[in-house]
Image (cartoon, grey):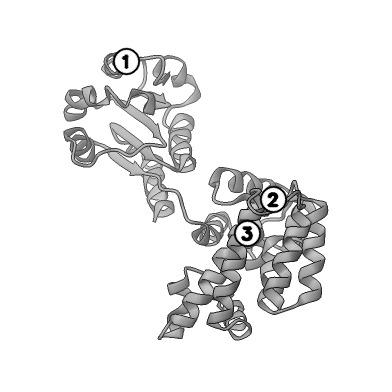
Amino acid sequence: MAFSKVTHIINDIKLGKPASIYFLFGDEPYYIDVISGYIEQHVLTEEEKGFNQTILYGRDVSVNEIISTAKRYPMMAERQVVIVKEAQDLSRTVDQLLPYAEQPQPTTVLVFCYKYKKFDKRKKLYKAIEKNGVLFESKKLYENQIPDWIRSVLASKGYTITPKASQMLVEFLGNDLGKINNELEKLQIISKPGAQFTPELIEENIGISKDFNNFELQNAIGSRDVAKAFKIIQYFGHNSKNHPLVMTLALLFSFFSKILKYHALTNKADAARALGVSPYFIKDYQIAARNYPMKKASKIISAIREIDMKSKGVGAGNITQGDLLKELLYAIFN
């Protein structure tokens, strides 16, 4: 949804139809940076930018100063661009923008980058910008939404990626879209047009092991591949900085919670949507559900909680991460 709306906003700018006001807000800074960056780079020519492009920072200016700047007329250009970065620092006074938002300067493109904050839809200012400009809320994606986002971003540039490769990126980088996009751009630079990104490519160029990661540990546990699971946690024990226990426990807790949910489903055909996973991976949950009945999955979740408490020093001495993972695997496989 966000990706398509960003594309629509940028397409309007490409057609020479920028809005008078852009108010970009929300918890995910990536799309705010994409839109404001595109406006900064493309609305004016390089010759026009010297006199007609102004970058302001919320901590350094008042709303009245922004309005005064926005009301200026462009010099030897069709329009001027005023971008207010870190506009969230103006949260206490931003309502003072209302008179301008009701009658914006038609020759100005005013951009507010209001990161990490909500914007109250009940306010008059919200409604004024909605009527006379563009409002865009940039929401954080859940981790189970990231693989589809990766595929969409790459497809728009003519590339593809295998499900395992996208899952490796999510497991390593979480839901930080900026970091993920940076890594994708690196891969595009070294790849031929139309290439498919594979686990091998990720391993060679980003440094994520295709064999020793949480995703592979989850698969080994789900299929009850005892030897592989113990081999992976041994690797984790020797590389605890790159494989923190808290991340492994969070992933396994989520995995077994989904197994419980799978058992409770009356319509297994709708399992992918119900569990919030890609249909490509639903077979892994089917296998895991056969290997771990509901009662066993519940006991494993209790064991994960216990190991989490021990990792925080509750009821345990100086136990290493590797030993805690071994203890957890014994609980899972016995």
Q: Is residue 24 above or below residue 231?
A: above
Q: Is residue 270 left or right of residue 169?
A: left
Q: Please state, as top left, top right, bottom left or bottom right, where the C terminus lies in the image.
A: bottom right
Residue at image position (54%, 54%) is 153
Left or right: 130 as drawn, with respect to 218: left
Q: Secondary structure at mark 3?
A: helix
- Front label number (1 vs 2): 2
Residue 135 percent coordinates (x, y): 30, 41
Q: Of marks 1 and 3, which one's residue comes earlier in the chain?
A: 1
Indicate whether 90 appears above or below 117. Answer: above
Q: Position of 259 compared to 198: left or right?
A: left
User: What's the residue type where badge 3 is placed?
Assistant: Leu
Residue occupied by mark 3 = 249
Q: Viewer-proximal residue, 197 or 25?
A: 25
Q: CA distance from mark 3 to mark 2?
A: 9 Å
Name the residue beneath numbered marker 1.
62
